[in-house]
Image (cartoon, rainbow, N blue to C red):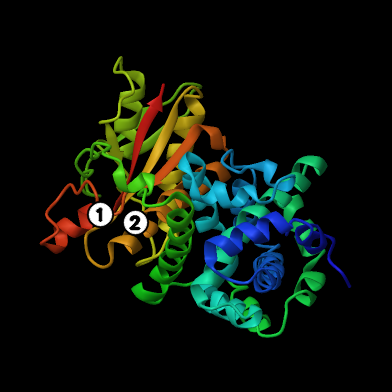
């Protein structure tokens, strides 16, 4: 049984796209065509397996509706080469790809890239990673087109994908069925290394596209000098207070926690600026992963209620790490975590255009990385009001 979705994606593999990708990656066009054709079901089959997972479909719907997604990719697929590697669009699409791959592949992204490279006859697994990074925006653009034409929300998108589960699995080539089956369940972080593997491989793949298409220009995020956020929030034992919101809602929160400080700032006469950041103080992640722990839901729900009460407010989410490990891995992890928070807030009803996200890696420490306490403070997510 053929999949109309896969057939539509195959039509996006144009001669212009293959020629550009071949020049960038140094791989034969025939191998790249074969690899991209396999990359599409490798991403979609595990998503179809998770079609009944409400949280997963909400995250997917959030990515599909993200304003950074270039819908012109459907008429000019070769734009994906420039889009992933140039300027502000590069940052947005790279973040979307970095969010889609763990959602679809979990901790099997590296294994899937290697299997993809072997199947297509590519020179290295990094070329397989680059193909996944190129395929991801095309998949999202096609899902967005379908969602907009048929008015599909998260539930409708899940039903539509679920209806194609068998066809998508049937489109998987030999050698990739195991990776798709293993990644069908949500990832569970068991150590720091597997959780870092996906961001590192993705960053290397996107970095190769950037360097070869743009010469020696450094990625935008590496040259930013945005001021560091304010000091870390108070301990969990801090006194609590009731914060009243417009419309009559009230929040029971720590007196000097993020929620109380954010509302005070929004209601004050202070203008939005680039130096006033607020650290989340109850937002834990799985170790070395962009997977939020369940106990983070309360603070995210509070922030969503605040943003709903102040509809003119727009915010930026910043991700930060300590300086342990590879700087490139830290940068990718911080970006993935910031995007994860952004996705959760959109799933709670906040319009995507009101939220921006960026990872800064080990930049802008607020404490001494020489101590464990300092490193813990530096591993954080912060929020800045950009409009009020």
Above or below residue 243? Residue 96 is below
Looking at the image, residue 312 sits to the left or right of residue 16; the answer is left
Above or below residue 141? Residue 200 is below
Which x, y percent locates residue 347?
Answer: 57, 45
Quadrant in which the N terminus appears: bottom right
Which x, y percent locates residue 5?
Answer: 80, 60
Question: Label for residue 386?
Answer: none
Which x, y percent locates residue 344?
Answer: 51, 48
In the orientation shown, which residue stands out farthest toward the top? 269
Which x, y percent locates residue 90?
Answer: 49, 46
Question: Label for residue 362?
Answer: 1
Q: Residues within 10 Å of mark 2 (few under 14, many from 20)?
A: many
Q: Do the CB atoms of the residues marked 2 and 1 lie less than 8 Å apart?
A: yes
Quadrant in which the C terminus appears: top left
Where residue 349 sits, quadrant-wise, is: top right
Looking at the image, residue 8 sits to the left or right of residue 113; the answer is right
Question: Label for residue 331?
Answer: 2
Q: Tell me the CA gap for discs 2 and 1.
A: 7 Å
Query: What residue is rendered at 56% in x and 61% in y?
Result: 23
Query: What residue is rendered at 51% in x and 77% in y?
Result: 124
Q: Nearer the viewer, residue 220 or 310?
A: 220
**Label 2 element class:** helix
| One can see residue 107 in this view | no
**Label 1 element class:** loop
Q: Nearer the viewer, residue 149 or 347?
A: 149
Above or below residue 208? Residue 45 is below
Looking at the image, residue 267 sits to the left or right of residue 133; the answer is left
Q: Residues within 10 Å of mark 1 (few under 14, many from 20)?
A: many
- Whichever of callouts 2 and 1 sits on the residue coming sooner in the sequence is 2
């Amino acid at each position: 049984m053929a999949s109309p979705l896969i057939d539509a994606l195959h039509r996006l593999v144009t001669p212009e796209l293959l020629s550009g990708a071949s020049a960038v990656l140094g791989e034969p066009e025939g191998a790249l065509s074969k690899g991209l054709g396999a990359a599409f079901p490798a991403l979609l089959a595990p998503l179809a397996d998770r079609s009944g997972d409400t949280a997963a479909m909400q995250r997917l719907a959030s990515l599909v509706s993200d304003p950074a997604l270039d819908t012109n990719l459907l008429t000019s697929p070769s734009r994906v080469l420039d889009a992933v590697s140039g300027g502000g669009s590069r940052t947005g699409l790279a973040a979307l790809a970095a969010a889609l791959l763990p959602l679809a592949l979990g901790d099997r992204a590296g294994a899937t890239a290697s299997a993809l490279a072997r199947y297509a006859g590519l020179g290295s697994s990094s070329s397989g990673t680059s193909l996944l990074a190129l395929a991801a925006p095309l998949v999202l653009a096609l899902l967005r087109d379908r969602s907009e034409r048929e008015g599909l929300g998260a539930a409708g998108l899940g039903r539509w994908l679920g209806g194609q589960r068998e066809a998508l699995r049937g489109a998987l080539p030999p050698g990739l069925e195991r990776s798709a089956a293993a990644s069908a369940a949500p990832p569970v972080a068991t150590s720091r290394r597997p959780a870092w593997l996906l961001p590192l491989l993705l960053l290397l793949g996107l970095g190769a596209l950037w360097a070869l298409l743009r010469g020696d220009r450094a990625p935008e995020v590496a040259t930013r000098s945005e001021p560091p956020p304010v000091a870390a929030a108070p301990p969990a034992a801090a006194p609590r207070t009731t914060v009243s919101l417009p419309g009559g809602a009230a929040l029971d929160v720590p007196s000097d926690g993020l929620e109380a400080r954010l509302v005070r700032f929004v209601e004050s006469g202070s203008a939005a600026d680039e130096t006033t950041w607020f650290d989340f103080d109850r937002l834990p992640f799985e170790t070395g992963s962009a997977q939020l722990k369940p106990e983070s839901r309360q603070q995210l729900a509070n922030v969503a209620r605040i943003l709903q009460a102040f509809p003119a407010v727009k915010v930026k989410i910043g991700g930060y790490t300590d300086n342990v490990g590879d700087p490139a891995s830290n940068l990718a992890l911080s970006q993935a975590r910031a995007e994860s928070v952004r996705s959760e807030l959109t799933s709670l009803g906040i319009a995507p255009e009101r939220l921006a996200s960026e990872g800064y890696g080990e930049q802008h420490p607020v404490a001494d990385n020489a101590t464990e306490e300092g490193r813990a403070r530096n591993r954080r997510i912060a929020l800045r009001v950009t409009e009020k």
